[in-house]
Amino acid sequence: MRVNVIGGGIIGLTIAWECRRRGHDVTVTDPSPQRAASQVAAGMLAPVGEAYFGEEALTALLIEAARQWPAFVDALGEDVGYRTEGTLQIGLTADDVRELSRLWRYQESLGCTVERVVPQDIEPLLSPRARGVRVRSDHQVDPRRVVSALARSVTIWPEPVEADLTVVAAGCGSAQWGLPVRPVKGVLLRLRGPVGLSHVIRGAADGQAVYLVPRDDGEVIVGATSEERTDFAAGAGAVRDLLRAATDLVPDLAEHALAETCVGHRPGTPDNAPIVGRLDEKTLVATGHYRHGVLAAPLTAMAIADLVDGKPLPPLWHSFSPGRFS
Ligand SMILES: Cc1cc2nc3c(=O)[nH]c(=O)nc-3n(C[C@H](O)[C@H](O)[C@H](O)COP(=O)(O)OP(=O)(O)OC[C@H]3O[C@@H](n4cnc5c(N)ncnc54)[C@H](O)[C@@H]3O)c2cc1C
């Protein structure tokens, strides 16, 4: 089958890769792949940390998505910065910890394992005020390395190519197909320096939500804002708030250099969940992955490849069809 995937972000490229593995003739169309949110994303694979009240079906999907990552990394056959040390969820003030505790209890009620720990025993550079839990099953990957590994397996064309089947995987651009996808702007910082963290740290410092994602090459990602805006400007206030929260959590980060300020647009949907399924006889869709597109990419690609192969969508996906908004 000739398949044209529209969109060269992590969703489109993983779909293209999976369809090629299954023997299809695949092309990818994208006039500006460098603008993809996938180039900005932190790469947390965190179904537990991302489990929020009222999103049980999404959490079940994301837990299954996380299970796909080890086999996906093996099949890619490249070092894409997949790290399994786990995640600390941290609060700094009593109010931060009280607020986060509600979430930890909810995560446990879903059957997720959330361990009470002394965080400084695990990450000695954390502020002495930090209190929190460890989630061993929330991992990380470097999305830029994943995207470049995937991009080597396919040619990306600027214009649409003739095909038997089209897959719309255009992130925020999917709105052009009448889908309810809107950009949710995120500012994220990349620091470089000597501080050695090994775990992902998610938390709150005086009410400011922040996460730190340490890479093995000395980079520390600090993210991220969430703004209903379409511009690409990194506001001074956003940068200040992120740096303040990051250095409150790990004071030694003040010694790092601010290497890069990034802005990306998450493809958000009305219910914060992806849109995956069939639009018409010749068009499939995989979009709206909002905060979870990196985590959900391998599972999404398998679902779309099943449809391309003429198989039904696995039941886990039934709550996420494009028809649910009509
Ligand atoms: C600050 C930030 C942090 C994030 N952190 C995480 C994280 O830790 N973990 C996680 O799982 N997710 C994270 N995300 C979310 C993740 O980045 C997205 O869910 C994911 O990138 C969506 O992938 P995508 O391929 O659908 O969209 P994109 O990566 O945006 O790619 C879409 C591509 O489609 C192209 N396109 C648009 N219109 C057209 C058209 N008409 N024709 C052809 N091509 C078109 C665009 O040029 C773009 O290259 C984060 C996002 C942001 C912004």
Image (cartoon, helix red, strand yellow):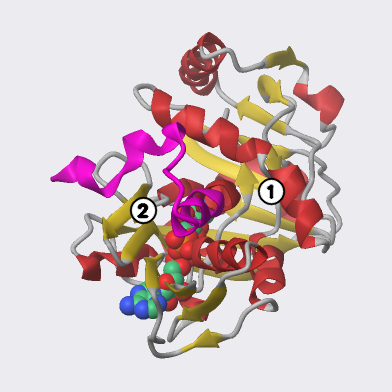
Distance from disc 2 to disc 1, alpha carbons, whole Å, reads: 23 Å
The residue beneath circle 2 is 288
In this view, 245 is above or below 80: above
| Residue 35 magenta-highlighted | no
Q: Looking at the image, tell me whether mark 2 or mark 1 is earlier in sequence order.
A: 1
Q: Look at the image and give the residue range highlighted in magenta.
A: 301-326
The amino acid type found where label 2 is placed reads Gly
Q: Which mark is residue 213?
A: 1
Q: In the image shown, does 45 or 221 lie closer to the viewer?
A: 45
Tell me which secondary structure the magenta stretch mostly adopts: helix
Please tell me which residue is depicted at 71% across the width and 23% down the height of the picture: 134
The amino acid type found where label 1 is placed reads Val
Q: Residue 63's x, y, as percent?
A: 57, 31
Q: Is mark 2 within 8 Å of ligand 1?
A: yes
Using a 10 Å C-alpha cutoff, classify the residue at mark 2 as few (fewer than 14 neighbours), some (14 to 19) or many (20 or more). many
Point out the image quarter for the C terminus: top left
Q: In the image shown, does 241 or 88 lie closer to the viewer?
A: 88
Q: Nearer the viewer, mark 2 or mark 1?
A: 2
Please tell me which residue is depicted at 46% across the width and 48% down the height of the picture: 311
